[in-house]
């Protein structure tokens, strides 16, 4: 079985709570059981700077004509492979993955994490010509649009959505 996990955090590089720990532990555990598992994550600077990358593809964003680079890295120790969405305008920022250094949420978080879902759905539909998952596992609201994008495309890829912290639901104004 091939499984793609979409998430916003990965310990030790990007972590604000328990999600980063889960994403650091679950895929290697599944790989140990024989699952061919990969991750897809936003290309936050901490990840891009720490890992050697190989470009896999470029996908169009749902917001513009531009194409976004998706690169593949192998995580040290576990050997699990991770796709990183290399879009500096969205992910090369100070502060946490979700907020500026003063704790104010980024006003474009709805777009930043919609892109995560978009890239995950694109990968689930074969954007990497060398690997395609049998299932997509979206973790928390950050990746929550991935199953919806698959459904809208009538893609025959099953998906699972896991809420890790119900206190954070990714609500945005209708004007966003």
Image (tube, grey):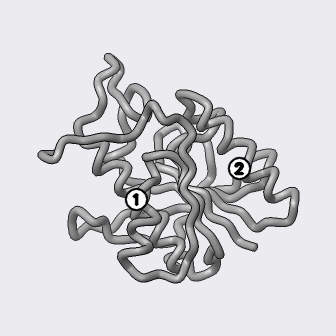
In the image shown, does 75 or 11 lie closer to the viewer? 11
Please tell me whether residue 108 is drawn above or below residue 52 in the rendered image: above
Check disc 1 and report its element: helix, strand or loop.
helix
> Residue at point 35% right, 55% down?
114
Q: Tell which residue pokes out farthest to the top in this image.
A: 102
Q: Is residue 70 left or right of residue 94?
A: right
Which quarter of the figure is the C terminus placed in? top left
Q: Is residue 64 left or right of residue 87?
A: left
In the image shown, does 13 or 118 lie closer to the viewer? 118
Q: Tell which residue pokes out farthest to the front in this image.
A: 166
Splitting the image into 4 quarters, where does residue 170 fall?
top left
Check disc 2 and report its element: helix, strand or loop.
loop
> Residue at point 44% right, 73% down?
150
Pointer 2: what residue?
A: 75
**Upstream in sequence: badge 2 or badge 1:** 2
Q: Is residue 159 left or right of residue 112?
A: right
């Amino acid at each position: 079985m091939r499984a793609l996990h979409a998430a916003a955090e990965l310990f030790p590089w990007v972590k604000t709570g328990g999600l980063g720990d889960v994403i650091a532990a679950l895929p290697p555990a599944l790989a140990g059981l024989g699952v061919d598992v990969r991750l897809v994550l936003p290309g936050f600077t901490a990840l891009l700077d720490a890992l050697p990358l190989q470009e896999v593809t470029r996908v169009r964003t749902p917001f513009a004509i531009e194409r976004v680079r998706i690169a593949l890295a192998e995580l040290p120790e576990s050997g699990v492979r991770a796709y990183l969405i290399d879009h500096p305008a969205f992910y090369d920022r100070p502060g946490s993955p979700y907020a500026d250094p003063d704790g104010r949420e980024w006003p474009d978080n709805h777009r930043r994490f919609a892109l995560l879902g978009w890239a995950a759905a694109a990968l689930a539909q074969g954007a990497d010509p060398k690997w395609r998952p049998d299932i997509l596992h979206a973790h928390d609201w950050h990746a929550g649009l991935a199953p919806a994008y698959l459904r809208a495309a009538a893609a025959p890829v099953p998906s699972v959505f896991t809420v890790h912290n119900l206190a954070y639901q990714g609500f945005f104004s209708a004007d966003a």
